Image (cartoon, coloured by chain):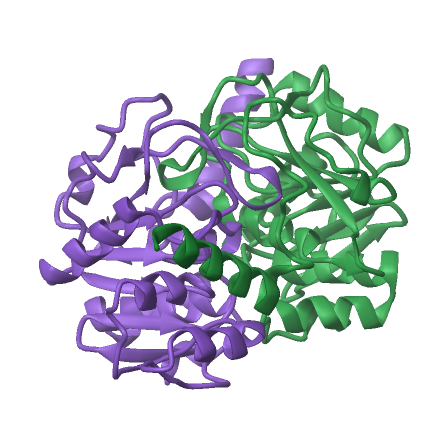
Chain colours: A purple, B green
Amino acid sequence: MKTTRALRFFLLLQIATLALHSSDVFAAGSNPSYWSPTAKNALTVAFVISDDADVIDMAGPWEVFQDVVVKKELGYRLYTVAESKAPVRLSSGLMVIPDFSFEDAPTPQLVVVGKQGGEGPSPTLRDWVRKMNAEQHTLMSVCTGAFVLADAGLLDGKPATTHHNAYKGFAKMFPRVKLEKGKRWVQSDPMIYTSGGLTSGIDLALHMVEMHYGRLVATETAAYLEHEGAGWKR
Amino acid sequence: MKTTRALRFFLLLQIATLALHSSDVFAAGSNPSYWSPTAKNALTVAFVISDDADVIDMAGPWEVFQDVVVKKELGYRLYTVAESKAPVRLSSGLMVIPDFSFEDAPTPQLVVVGKQGGEGPSPTLRDWVRKMNAEQHTLMSVCTGAFVLADAGLLDGKPATTHHNAYKGFAKMFPRVKLEKGKRWVQSDPMIYTSGGLTSGIDLALHMVEMHYGRLVATETAAYLEHEGAGWKR
Protein backbone atom coordinates (compact mmCIF):
# COMPACT_ATOMS: atom_id res chain seq x y z
CA MET A 1 0.00 0.00 0.00
CA LYS A 2 2.64 2.48 1.11
CA THR A 3 4.85 1.86 -1.88
CA THR A 4 2.00 2.12 -4.35
CA ARG A 5 0.88 5.37 -2.83
CA ALA A 6 4.36 6.85 -2.84
CA LEU A 7 4.93 5.75 -6.40
CA ARG A 8 1.59 7.16 -7.54
CA PHE A 9 2.43 10.44 -5.82
CA PHE A 10 5.82 10.53 -7.44
CA LEU A 11 4.56 9.70 -10.89
CA LEU A 12 1.72 12.18 -10.84
CA LEU A 13 3.98 14.92 -9.59
CA GLN A 14 6.58 14.26 -12.22
CA ILE A 15 4.09 13.90 -15.04
CA ALA A 16 2.05 16.89 -14.04
CA THR A 17 4.71 19.47 -13.61
CA LEU A 18 8.21 18.62 -13.29
CA ALA A 19 9.33 16.35 -16.06
CA LEU A 20 11.35 19.02 -17.77
CA HIS A 21 12.09 21.12 -14.78
CA SER A 22 13.21 18.64 -12.21
CA SER A 23 16.86 18.82 -11.51
CA ASP A 24 17.72 15.16 -11.60
CA VAL A 25 20.83 16.17 -13.50
CA PHE A 26 22.19 16.82 -10.07
CA ALA A 27 22.39 13.79 -7.87
CA ALA A 28 22.66 14.16 -4.13
CA GLY A 29 26.08 13.93 -2.60
CA SER A 30 29.20 15.91 -2.17
CA ASN A 31 30.85 15.09 -5.48
CA PRO A 32 30.48 18.02 -7.82
CA SER A 33 30.75 15.86 -10.94
CA TYR A 34 26.99 15.75 -11.22
CA TRP A 35 26.40 17.33 -14.59
CA SER A 36 24.27 15.11 -16.72
CA PRO A 37 24.90 14.43 -20.40
CA THR A 38 21.48 15.98 -21.04
CA ALA A 39 23.00 19.29 -20.12
CA LYS A 40 26.14 18.86 -22.17
CA ASN A 41 25.38 21.82 -24.41
CA ALA A 42 24.27 23.94 -21.52
CA LEU A 43 25.95 27.18 -20.56
CA THR A 44 27.82 27.09 -17.28
CA VAL A 45 26.98 29.69 -14.65
CA ALA A 46 29.15 30.32 -11.58
CA PHE A 47 27.58 31.85 -8.46
CA VAL A 48 30.01 33.57 -6.12
CA ILE A 49 29.14 33.05 -2.45
CA SER A 50 30.67 33.86 0.92
CA ASP A 51 29.62 34.19 4.54
CA ASP A 52 26.72 36.65 4.67
CA ALA A 53 26.29 36.70 0.88
CA ASP A 54 22.68 37.53 0.17
CA VAL A 55 20.32 34.60 -0.41
CA ILE A 56 18.07 35.97 -3.15
CA ASP A 57 20.90 37.68 -5.02
CA MET A 58 22.07 34.14 -5.68
CA ALA A 59 18.80 32.19 -5.55
CA GLY A 60 16.78 34.44 -7.87
CA PRO A 61 19.08 34.02 -10.89
CA TRP A 62 19.76 30.39 -9.83
CA GLU A 63 16.08 29.56 -10.15
CA VAL A 64 15.75 31.39 -13.46
CA PHE A 65 18.66 29.57 -15.07
CA GLN A 66 17.71 26.15 -13.70
CA ASP A 67 14.22 26.46 -15.15
CA VAL A 68 15.35 27.17 -18.71
CA VAL A 69 14.43 24.33 -21.05
CA VAL A 70 15.52 24.42 -24.67
CA LYS A 71 14.29 21.63 -26.92
CA LYS A 72 13.75 19.39 -23.91
CA GLU A 73 17.24 19.96 -22.57
CA LEU A 74 18.36 22.19 -19.74
CA GLY A 75 19.81 25.48 -20.87
CA TYR A 76 22.27 25.95 -18.03
CA ARG A 77 24.38 24.10 -15.51
CA LEU A 78 25.02 25.86 -12.22
CA TYR A 79 27.61 25.82 -9.50
CA THR A 80 28.61 27.80 -6.45
CA VAL A 81 32.15 29.04 -5.92
CA ALA A 82 33.84 30.61 -2.89
CA GLU A 83 37.22 31.20 -1.28
CA SER A 84 37.28 27.58 -0.17
CA LYS A 85 34.93 24.62 -0.05
CA ALA A 86 34.27 25.08 3.65
CA PRO A 87 30.59 25.67 4.46
CA VAL A 88 29.50 29.29 4.45
CA ARG A 89 26.47 30.88 6.04
CA LEU A 90 24.59 33.03 3.57
CA SER A 91 22.31 35.80 4.84
CA SER A 92 20.24 34.90 7.92
CA GLY A 93 22.29 31.77 8.32
CA LEU A 94 21.50 29.57 5.33
CA MET A 95 24.38 27.11 5.39
CA VAL A 96 25.76 26.22 1.96
CA ILE A 97 28.70 24.05 0.92
CA PRO A 98 30.40 25.63 -2.11
CA ASP A 99 30.91 23.30 -5.06
CA PHE A 100 34.26 24.81 -5.95
CA SER A 101 36.93 27.24 -4.78
CA PHE A 102 38.25 30.02 -7.00
CA GLU A 103 41.28 27.79 -7.58
CA ASP A 104 39.49 24.79 -9.04
CA ALA A 105 36.24 26.18 -10.47
CA PRO A 106 35.53 25.07 -14.04
CA THR A 107 35.40 27.77 -16.69
CA PRO A 108 31.98 29.45 -16.67
CA GLN A 109 30.31 31.33 -19.49
CA LEU A 110 28.58 33.57 -16.96
CA VAL A 111 29.44 34.69 -13.43
CA VAL A 112 26.80 35.94 -10.98
CA VAL A 113 28.05 38.15 -8.14
CA GLY A 114 25.50 39.20 -5.53
CA LYS A 115 26.06 41.02 -2.28
CA GLN A 116 29.04 39.44 -0.52
CA GLY A 117 29.76 39.51 3.18
CA GLY A 118 32.98 40.52 4.88
CA GLU A 119 35.11 43.61 4.72
CA GLY A 120 35.04 44.13 0.99
CA PRO A 121 36.22 41.76 -1.73
CA SER A 122 39.20 39.58 -0.85
CA PRO A 123 42.27 39.79 -3.09
CA THR A 124 41.37 36.28 -4.31
CA LEU A 125 37.86 37.31 -5.34
CA ARG A 126 39.15 40.54 -6.92
CA ASP A 127 41.73 38.62 -8.95
CA TRP A 128 39.22 35.95 -9.99
CA VAL A 129 36.66 38.50 -11.16
CA ARG A 130 39.36 40.32 -13.15
CA LYS A 131 40.49 37.00 -14.64
CA MET A 132 36.94 36.11 -15.66
CA ASN A 133 36.63 39.50 -17.33
CA ALA A 134 40.01 39.20 -19.03
CA GLU A 135 38.99 35.80 -20.40
CA GLN A 136 35.79 37.40 -21.76
CA HIS A 137 33.28 35.52 -19.65
CA THR A 138 30.14 37.52 -18.95
CA LEU A 139 29.80 39.05 -15.49
CA MET A 140 26.53 40.06 -13.89
CA SER A 141 26.13 41.70 -10.50
CA VAL A 142 23.02 41.68 -8.35
CA CYS A 143 22.38 44.28 -5.67
CA THR A 144 25.63 45.44 -3.99
CA GLY A 145 27.52 42.84 -6.00
CA ALA A 146 28.18 45.90 -8.16
CA PHE A 147 30.64 47.01 -5.45
CA VAL A 148 32.71 43.91 -6.22
CA LEU A 149 32.87 44.67 -9.94
CA ALA A 150 33.55 48.37 -9.33
CA ASP A 151 36.22 47.55 -6.76
CA ALA A 152 37.94 45.41 -9.41
CA GLY A 153 38.01 48.48 -11.65
CA LEU A 154 35.73 46.88 -14.23
CA LEU A 155 33.07 49.59 -14.21
CA ASP A 156 35.22 52.73 -14.54
CA GLY A 157 33.71 55.11 -17.06
CA LYS A 158 30.73 52.80 -17.60
CA PRO A 159 27.06 52.91 -16.61
CA ALA A 160 26.02 50.65 -13.74
CA THR A 161 23.40 50.25 -11.04
CA THR A 162 23.00 48.74 -7.57
CA HIS A 163 20.51 48.52 -4.67
CA HIS A 164 18.66 51.82 -4.23
CA ASN A 165 19.81 52.18 -0.62
CA ALA A 166 23.42 51.92 -1.81
CA TYR A 167 23.30 54.67 -4.46
CA LYS A 168 24.89 57.30 -2.21
CA GLY A 169 27.67 55.07 -0.91
CA PHE A 170 28.38 53.69 -4.37
CA ALA A 171 28.61 57.12 -5.98
CA LYS A 172 30.93 58.34 -3.24
CA MET A 173 33.16 55.30 -3.40
CA PHE A 174 33.26 54.91 -7.17
CA PRO A 175 32.97 58.40 -8.66
CA ARG A 176 34.27 57.18 -12.02
CA VAL A 177 31.32 54.83 -12.50
CA LYS A 178 28.25 56.35 -14.15
CA LEU A 179 25.61 55.34 -11.62
CA GLU A 180 22.14 54.92 -13.11
CA LYS A 181 19.26 55.11 -10.64
CA GLY A 182 15.84 53.52 -10.79
CA LYS A 183 16.79 50.82 -13.27
CA ARG A 184 16.06 47.10 -12.96
CA TRP A 185 19.38 46.46 -14.66
CA VAL A 186 21.99 48.20 -16.79
CA GLN A 187 24.32 46.87 -19.45
CA SER A 188 27.69 48.29 -18.44
CA ASP A 189 29.68 47.03 -21.40
CA PRO A 190 29.39 44.14 -23.88
CA MET A 191 30.39 41.59 -21.23
CA ILE A 192 29.22 43.20 -17.95
CA TYR A 193 25.72 43.73 -16.58
CA THR A 194 24.62 45.15 -13.23
CA SER A 195 21.17 44.85 -11.68
CA GLY A 196 19.39 46.76 -8.94
CA GLY A 197 18.59 45.29 -5.55
CA LEU A 198 17.62 41.76 -4.62
CA THR A 199 14.62 40.69 -6.76
CA SER A 200 15.85 42.68 -9.76
CA GLY A 201 18.43 39.94 -10.29
CA ILE A 202 15.55 37.77 -11.52
CA ASP A 203 14.87 40.26 -14.30
CA LEU A 204 18.52 40.52 -15.33
CA ALA A 205 18.77 36.72 -15.40
CA LEU A 206 15.70 36.54 -17.64
CA HIS A 207 17.31 39.12 -19.91
CA MET A 208 20.38 36.86 -20.11
CA VAL A 209 18.11 33.96 -21.07
CA GLU A 210 16.61 36.08 -23.82
CA MET A 211 20.07 36.94 -25.12
CA HIS A 212 21.21 33.32 -25.06
CA TYR A 213 18.06 31.52 -26.20
CA GLY A 214 15.65 34.14 -27.51
CA ARG A 215 12.46 35.87 -26.42
CA LEU A 216 10.23 32.79 -26.62
CA VAL A 217 12.35 30.72 -24.22
CA ALA A 218 12.66 33.68 -21.83
CA THR A 219 8.90 34.23 -21.94
CA GLU A 220 8.25 30.54 -21.24
CA THR A 221 10.70 30.63 -18.36
CA ALA A 222 9.10 33.74 -16.84
CA ALA A 223 5.66 32.10 -17.16
CA TYR A 224 6.90 28.89 -15.56
CA LEU A 225 8.32 30.98 -12.70
CA GLU A 226 4.98 32.79 -12.38
CA HIS A 227 7.12 35.91 -12.45
CA GLU A 228 4.92 38.99 -12.66
CA GLY A 229 7.51 41.67 -13.42
CA ALA A 230 8.27 42.80 -16.95
CA GLY A 231 11.58 44.49 -16.16
CA TRP A 232 13.57 41.83 -17.99
CA LYS A 233 12.08 42.89 -21.31
CA ARG A 234 13.71 46.29 -21.40
CA MET B 1 46.99 50.64 2.77
CA LYS B 2 45.15 47.38 2.22
CA THR B 3 43.56 47.44 5.65
CA THR B 4 42.43 51.04 5.33
CA ARG B 5 40.88 50.35 1.96
CA ALA B 6 39.07 47.25 3.15
CA LEU B 7 37.83 49.02 6.22
CA ARG B 8 36.58 51.99 4.21
CA PHE B 9 34.79 49.64 1.84
CA PHE B 10 33.25 47.80 4.74
CA LEU B 11 32.11 50.91 6.55
CA LEU B 12 30.63 52.59 3.52
CA LEU B 13 28.80 49.46 2.52
CA GLN B 14 27.37 48.97 5.98
CA ILE B 15 26.43 52.60 6.46
CA ALA B 16 24.95 53.04 3.04
CA THR B 17 22.66 50.08 2.87
CA LEU B 18 22.98 47.30 5.15
CA ALA B 19 22.97 48.46 8.72
CA LEU B 20 19.53 47.14 9.43
CA HIS B 21 19.46 44.40 6.88
CA SER B 22 22.76 42.68 7.33
CA SER B 23 22.42 39.31 8.93
CA ASP B 24 25.20 39.56 11.43
CA VAL B 25 22.83 37.94 13.88
CA PHE B 26 23.99 34.76 12.24
CA ALA B 27 27.64 34.04 12.70
CA ALA B 28 29.40 31.64 10.39
CA GLY B 29 29.90 28.13 11.61
CA SER B 30 28.05 24.93 12.08
CA ASN B 31 26.53 25.67 15.47
CA PRO B 32 22.90 26.63 15.03
CA SER B 33 22.81 28.60 18.27
CA TYR B 34 23.37 31.81 16.36
CA TRP B 35 20.25 33.77 17.14
CA SER B 36 21.16 37.17 18.42
CA PRO B 37 19.46 38.86 21.35
CA THR B 38 18.40 41.56 18.92
CA ALA B 39 16.03 39.07 17.41
CA LYS B 40 14.69 37.76 20.70
CA ASN B 41 11.15 38.90 20.02
CA ALA B 42 11.29 37.69 16.45
CA LEU B 43 8.97 35.05 15.07
CA THR B 44 10.63 31.76 14.22
CA VAL B 45 10.20 30.38 10.71
CA ALA B 46 11.11 26.80 9.76
CA PHE B 47 11.95 25.99 6.13
CA VAL B 48 11.52 22.35 5.16
CA ILE B 49 14.19 21.15 2.74
CA SER B 50 15.24 17.87 1.13
CA ASP B 51 17.23 16.64 -1.85
CA ASP B 52 15.81 18.32 -4.95
CA ALA B 53 13.66 20.73 -2.95
CA ASP B 54 13.16 23.82 -5.04
CA VAL B 55 15.55 26.73 -4.42
CA ILE B 56 13.25 29.72 -4.82
CA ASP B 57 10.33 28.08 -3.00
CA MET B 58 12.59 28.33 0.01
CA ALA B 59 14.76 31.33 -0.88
CA GLY B 60 11.94 33.70 -1.87
CA PRO B 61 10.18 33.63 1.52
CA TRP B 62 13.58 33.35 3.25
CA GLU B 63 14.66 36.68 1.78
CA VAL B 64 11.33 38.33 2.58
CA PHE B 65 11.40 37.31 6.24
CA GLN B 66 15.09 38.10 6.74
CA ASP B 67 14.56 41.63 5.43
CA VAL B 68 11.78 42.52 7.84
CA VAL B 69 12.85 45.20 10.28
CA VAL B 70 10.53 46.32 13.04
CA LYS B 71 11.66 49.21 15.21
CA LYS B 72 15.29 48.50 14.32
CA GLU B 73 15.02 44.82 15.22
CA LEU B 74 14.69 41.85 12.94
CA GLY B 75 11.15 40.54 12.68
CA TYR B 76 12.01 36.88 12.10
CA ARG B 77 14.62 34.26 12.82
CA LEU B 78 14.98 31.53 10.23
CA TYR B 79 16.17 27.95 10.10
CA THR B 80 16.18 25.01 7.74
CA VAL B 81 14.90 21.58 8.79
CA ALA B 82 15.12 18.20 7.06
CA GLU B 83 15.04 14.45 7.71
CA SER B 84 18.56 14.65 9.07
CA LYS B 85 21.38 17.15 9.29
CA ALA B 86 23.25 15.53 6.42
CA PRO B 87 23.84 17.91 3.48
CA VAL B 88 21.11 17.95 0.85
CA ARG B 89 21.25 19.12 -2.73
CA LEU B 90 18.42 21.49 -3.52
CA SER B 91 17.29 21.95 -7.11
CA SER B 92 20.12 22.13 -9.65
CA GLY B 93 22.52 20.99 -7.00
CA LEU B 94 22.70 23.80 -4.44
CA MET B 95 24.22 22.03 -1.46
CA VAL B 96 22.75 23.03 1.90
CA ILE B 97 23.41 21.76 5.42
CA PRO B 98 20.12 21.69 7.35
CA ASP B 99 20.20 23.45 10.72
CA PHE B 100 17.93 20.89 12.35
CA SER B 101 16.24 17.55 11.84
CA PHE B 102 12.51 17.07 12.40
CA GLU B 103 13.46 15.50 15.72
CA ASP B 104 15.31 18.42 17.24
CA ALA B 105 13.91 21.49 15.46
CA PRO B 106 12.86 24.28 17.82
CA THR B 107 9.20 25.21 17.85
CA PRO B 108 8.43 27.54 14.95
CA GLN B 109 5.56 30.00 14.65
CA LEU B 110 5.50 29.46 10.89
CA VAL B 111 6.50 26.56 8.63
CA VAL B 112 7.35 27.04 4.94
CA VAL B 113 7.00 23.96 2.73
CA GLY B 114 8.08 24.31 -0.89
CA LYS B 115 8.40 21.65 -3.53
CA GLN B 116 10.20 18.66 -2.02
CA GLY B 117 12.16 16.03 -3.88
CA GLY B 118 11.80 12.29 -3.62
CA GLU B 119 8.86 9.96 -4.02
CA GLY B 120 6.31 11.94 -2.05
CA PRO B 121 6.47 13.03 1.58
CA SER B 122 8.24 10.67 3.96
CA PRO B 123 6.26 9.40 6.97
CA THR B 124 8.51 11.59 9.12
CA LEU B 125 7.68 14.74 7.17
CA ARG B 126 3.98 13.83 7.08
CA ASP B 127 3.93 13.34 10.84
CA TRP B 128 5.88 16.53 11.51
CA VAL B 129 3.59 18.63 9.33
CA ARG B 130 0.54 17.16 11.09
CA LYS B 131 2.15 17.85 14.45
CA MET B 132 2.85 21.46 13.52
CA ASN B 133 -0.78 21.83 12.48
CA ALA B 134 -2.08 20.12 15.62
CA GLU B 135 0.02 22.51 17.72
CA GLN B 136 -1.50 25.44 15.81
CA HIS B 137 1.63 26.72 14.15
CA THR B 138 0.93 28.39 10.82
CA LEU B 139 1.76 26.40 7.69
CA MET B 140 2.42 27.89 4.28
CA SER B 141 3.12 25.97 1.11
CA VAL B 142 4.87 27.28 -1.99
CA CYS B 143 4.44 25.69 -5.42
CA THR B 144 3.94 21.92 -5.19
CA GLY B 145 4.57 22.09 -1.46
CA ALA B 146 0.75 22.06 -1.47
CA PHE B 147 1.04 18.32 -2.29
CA VAL B 148 2.73 17.81 1.07
CA LEU B 149 -0.04 19.56 3.00
CA ALA B 150 -2.76 17.80 0.98
CA ASP B 151 -1.06 14.44 1.43
CA ALA B 152 -1.15 15.02 5.19
CA GLY B 153 -4.91 15.49 4.89
CA LEU B 154 -4.74 19.11 6.02
CA LEU B 155 -6.47 20.59 2.98
CA ASP B 156 -9.51 18.32 2.67
CA GLY B 157 -12.65 20.36 2.01
CA LYS B 158 -10.62 23.58 1.91
CA PRO B 159 -9.55 25.96 -0.86
CA ALA B 160 -5.90 25.74 -1.96
CA THR B 161 -3.60 26.46 -4.87
CA THR B 162 -0.32 25.21 -6.35
CA HIS B 163 1.92 25.67 -9.42
CA HIS B 164 -0.16 26.13 -12.57
CA ASN B 165 1.45 23.14 -14.30
CA ALA B 166 0.37 20.96 -11.37
CA TYR B 167 -3.34 21.87 -11.35
CA LYS B 168 -4.40 18.74 -13.23
CA GLY B 169 -2.33 16.32 -11.20
CA PHE B 170 -3.31 17.98 -7.94
CA ALA B 171 -7.04 17.88 -8.72
CA LYS B 172 -6.80 14.23 -9.71
CA MET B 173 -4.84 13.21 -6.66
CA PHE B 174 -6.71 15.31 -4.09
CA PRO B 175 -10.31 15.57 -5.30
CA ARG B 176 -11.49 16.66 -1.87
CA VAL B 177 -9.41 19.83 -1.95
CA LYS B 178 -11.06 22.86 -3.56
CA LEU B 179 -8.37 23.81 -6.05
CA GLU B 180 -8.33 27.51 -6.93
CA LYS B 181 -6.60 28.42 -10.15
CA GLY B 182 -4.87 31.62 -11.17
CA LYS B 183 -4.28 32.85 -7.65
CA ARG B 184 -1.00 34.11 -6.21
CA TRP B 185 -2.00 32.55 -2.90
CA VAL B 186 -5.06 31.23 -1.09
CA GLN B 187 -5.90 31.14 2.61
CA SER B 188 -7.00 27.54 3.15
CA ASP B 189 -8.02 27.87 6.77
CA PRO B 190 -7.09 30.15 9.69
CA MET B 191 -3.68 28.48 10.08
CA ILE B 192 -2.89 27.24 6.55
CA TYR B 193 -1.95 29.16 3.41
CA THR B 194 -0.98 27.87 -0.02
CA SER B 195 0.71 29.85 -2.79
CA GLY B 196 1.05 29.32 -6.52
CA GLY B 197 4.32 28.44 -8.21
CA LEU B 198 7.83 29.54 -7.38
CA THR B 199 7.94 33.37 -7.25
CA SER B 200 4.43 33.57 -5.81
CA GLY B 201 5.88 32.43 -2.48
CA ILE B 202 7.39 35.92 -2.23
CA ASP B 203 3.89 37.42 -2.29
CA LEU B 204 2.51 35.01 0.28
CA ALA B 205 5.47 35.73 2.56
CA LEU B 206 4.82 39.47 2.23
CA HIS B 207 1.19 38.82 3.12
CA MET B 208 2.39 37.01 6.25
CA VAL B 209 4.53 40.03 7.12
CA GLU B 210 1.49 42.25 6.75
CA MET B 211 -0.52 40.00 9.05
CA HIS B 212 2.24 39.90 11.66
CA TYR B 213 3.54 43.47 11.52
CA GLY B 214 1.07 45.51 9.49
CA ARG B 215 0.83 47.06 6.05
CA LEU B 216 3.55 49.68 6.58
CA VAL B 217 6.25 47.14 7.50
CA ALA B 218 5.19 44.89 4.61
CA THR B 219 5.30 47.83 2.20
CA GLU B 220 8.75 48.83 3.43
CA THR B 221 9.96 45.25 3.04
CA ALA B 222 8.61 44.96 -0.50
CA ALA B 223 10.28 48.28 -1.38
CA TYR B 224 13.58 47.15 0.13
CA LEU B 225 13.32 43.96 -1.93
CA GLU B 226 12.62 46.04 -5.06
CA HIS B 227 9.72 43.63 -5.49
CA GLU B 228 7.49 44.78 -8.33
CA GLY B 229 4.48 42.50 -7.86
CA ALA B 230 1.41 43.57 -5.90
CA GLY B 231 -0.01 40.08 -5.40
CA TRP B 232 0.74 40.13 -1.69
CA LYS B 233 -1.79 42.93 -1.12
CA ARG B 234 -4.83 40.86 -2.03
Relative to residue A101, is residue B21 drawn left or right?
A: right
Query: From the viewer's perspective, is A49 left or right of A210?
Result: right
- Assign the C terminus of chain A to one quadrant of the image: bottom left
Q: How many marks?
A: 0
Residue found at x 49% / y 45%? B55
Please determine whether, in this image, residue A29 is positioned above or below residue A226.
above
Q: Quarter of the image holding residue B67?
A: bottom right
**Residue nearer the viewer, B196 or B215:** B215
Q: Report which quarter residue A220 is drawn in.
A: bottom left
The one nearer the camera, B34 or B56, is: B34
Identify the image quadrant of residue B163: bottom right
Q: Residue A111's x, y, as percent?
A: 27, 56
Percent across and percent down for residue A177 are 33, 81
Query: Please, which residue is most extreme toward the left here?
Result: A135
Provide residue B159's location: percent of width, then percent of height.
78, 53
| Residue at x 60% of width, y 65% of height | B15
- Position above or below: B227 against B187: below
